[in-house]
Image (spheres, rainbow, N blue to C red):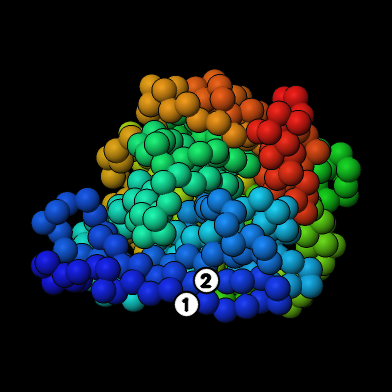
Amino acid sequence: MSAPGRNLESMNEMTSTQLGQLHLEELTLEVPLTTDATDFRTIEVFARIATRPGGENLPYLVFLQGGPGNEAPRPSLSPLNPSWLAVALERYRVIMLDQRGTGRSTPVGDSILEKPTAEVVEYLSHLRADGIVRDAEAIREYLGVTKWNLLGQSFGGFTTLHYLSTHADSLDQVFLTGGLSAIDRPAEDIYSNCYNRMQRNSEWYYRRFPQHRDIFRGLVEKARAGEITLPTGEVVSESRLRSLGHLLGSNDGWLDLYHLLELAPDTNAFRHDLANLLPFGNRNPIYYVLHESSYADGVITNWAAERVYPEAFRADTSLLTGEHVFQEWTDTVPSLQPWKEVALELAQMPWPKLYDAAALETSNATGAAAVYANDVFVPIDFSLETAAHIPGVQVYITSEHEHNGLRASSGEVLQHLFDLADGRKVR
């Protein structure tokens, strides 16, 4: 916590380095945690700026990572990573922002649980899209930029919509990939829609590999009997096992599921691979405890995914779930057990609205958005409802890629969005 009257600018720092021919600048800013002028708590926010040779005067493109709870990708060479970066660097200097609570932006970890639960819940309530947008604005002002551009992947696209709702004057063009969130809909609607899509993708998988349906049903029986234990000590519950369906939401995740189900369940290989493939239990706890809040546009979530669990999934244990979170994991997943009280209170949080449809319609937003026809995490029908509020953002609908199309296409999806925004392709 900063003392009253502290000069935040004195805490800001920028350093430079080289990664091959890439010029990298690393920026750390100290920013207010809240919008309350009487609240002197601060956090650090980290961003890395990548510039190609000769690109020193190019405009900025801010990349907002998916999540919540994931830091920005770390650039590397041979090949250049992230895979879309080369395309972006042709026309922009790329800012990769570690969203508050992740990476080097005052990350949230188990140590915060030393504080009373109410304090932890209050602190985490400031780590949503609204706080991330305030941090981005602080960076923009620090760099002396009047307008810049955004690339929002998944949750980063949700954050982009809030940016357009509140600070559209700061934005030139916006590009979204699997990130057109539903507006003015309860979380229950979104999760129900996603269950339907997971049922479809489950059936698609079993039509391709019919031998795996009975194998998975057998694994569910083992989970119900408490017979699957991970190296972490977690006794895998049925709901955790079925959450492997999140793999069916990416271009090549089905292959990981295939290889797992080829292994004997009583082997070390199976247990280790299963531990690595299950979502939510590793790395940043924000991904679990704040996940449903990502869909909370002015509502209380109250374990929405659990409350709308379909009868079809109860009847057929071969069906897999996706990015659906369950309360029972606070009892069965060792890494989440310490977060139980926090998760329970966050589930009852009356979240403020994030999106303003009227503001979006008057934002004069331009750019392009990739909408994946088979997306199991961000449903196409709700995405198109949202797209209607920003008609200047061209929509690219494709069934060629799943939710991770930005990364999986090695820049192809991003180039298509650039071409659409430039008028070189038709929507």
Considering depth in this image, is 33 or 336 the residue closer to the camera? 33
Instruction: State the image coordinates of residue 374 (x, y, percent, origin top left).
Output: 71, 34
Residue 98 shown left or right of residue 94 in the figure: left
* Residue 15 tag number: 1
Q: Residues within 10 Å of mark 1 (few under 14, many from 20)?
A: few
* Residue positioned 66% across, 70% down in the render: 22
Q: Quadrant of the C terminus?
A: top right
Say if mark 1 contacts mark 2, CB within 8 Å.
Answer: yes
- Quadrant housing the N terminus: bottom left
Tally the marks.
2
Mark 2: which secondary structure? strand
* Left or right side of 388 for 202: right
Q: Is residue 160 above or below residue 100?
A: above
The image shows residue 322 at horizontal and vertical percentages of 62, 46
**In the structure shown, which secondary structural element does the residue marked by tag 1 occupy?**
strand
Q: Residue at x 43, y 73 (%)?
A: 14
Q: Nearer the viewer, residue 113 or 411?
A: 411
